[in-house]
Amino acid sequence: MIISHIILKISSKILKFSVRVMLVLFMSLHFFDAACSVNSIDFLRITSNRGLSSEEIRNIFQDKEGYMWFLTPDGLNKYDGYTFKIYKKNSGDIGFPTSAFECVCEGPEQRIWLGTAEQGLVIFDTYANELRRFEDISKKAALPEKSIRSLLCDRANNIWIGTENGLYLYNTLEDSLQYYNLVNLENPLPEWCIIEDIVGMIRAISG
């Protein structure tokens, strides 16, 4: 009887251990399947066959309304998830100065700021369907650069402008332009990536 009782206790412990092992294995497989499901991403390739004006993409941007903007050397492409609306030089009654765009950001009043390689900075008001140059909206500031490499609108609605000769900060409230001279650096910095981190610090990365 004592031996049987001991064997029964041992069998009970083995059964509990086996149940725990099976439970751990089941949960591990469940989480593995869930992780595989999360990591399974479908990609859709968008080409000129779907309406894109050029397959050479220089910049991609999503505005606050969810529209995707694709900047190409052959037009500005606005994508609603189904169809493209393409803006080119002198297209329609808007009169874009060029078809080649380098960089983009969304400024105050949901205006799209566009940097070009040779025509400077232009601002596209999508609601009014109106295009204006920087010198048309600023009464005080004058931007001497024509080759705009990068743009950023920070949380204070300031526009950071990266050019071959350095950085400019345009204060949209005060209509003022501040230039950061980088000519004295040993290596020229023609390319810029301007970002704003989570604490509001502006970081300009050259490459």
Image (tube, rainbow, N blue to C red):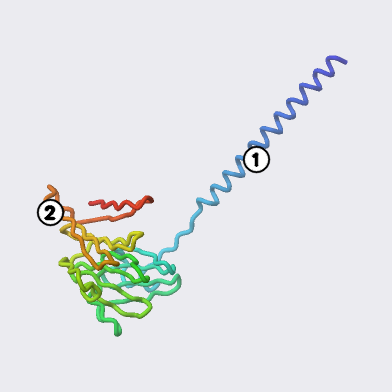
Nearer to me, 198 or 140? 140
Q: Position of residue 72 (x, y in %)?
A: 29, 68
Where residue 93 sits in the image (x, y, percent)?
29, 85
For residue 30, side relative to residue 57 (left or right): right
Which structural element holds mark 1? helix
- Between circles 1 and 2, the one closer to the viewer is 2
From this viewpoint, is residue 52 visible?
no
**Is the residue marked by circle 2 packed among few (<14), some (14-19), or many (20+) residues within 10 Å?**
few
Tell whether label 2 touches label 1 (CB within 8 Å): no
Residue 65 position within the rendered picture, expressed as x and y whole percent measured from the top left: 43, 69
Q: CA distance from mark 1 to mark 2?
A: 63 Å
Q: Secondary structure at mark 2?
A: loop
Tell me: residue 199, above or below residue 15.
below
Q: Residue at x 44, y 63 (%)?
A: 44
Question: How many numbered circles are shown?
Answer: 2
Can residue 193 be seen here?
yes
Mark 2, residue position: 183
- Which quarter shows the N terminus? top right
Residue at screen point 18% across, 65% down: 147
**Which comes sooner in the sequence, label 1 or label 2?**
1
| Amino acid type, residue under disc 1 in the picture | Phe
51 lies above or below 57 = below
- Residue sitting at 27 percent across and 55 percent down? 193
Q: Which is nearer the eye, 143 or 13?
A: 143
Dot 1, how many residues are within 10 Å of its Cα: few (below 14), some (14-19), or many (20+)?
few
**Which residue does the numbered mark 1 point to in the structure image?**
26
Q: Is residue 180 left or right of residue 32?
A: left
Where residue 105 sits: x, y (%)? 32, 65
Q: Amino acid at mark 2?
A: Val
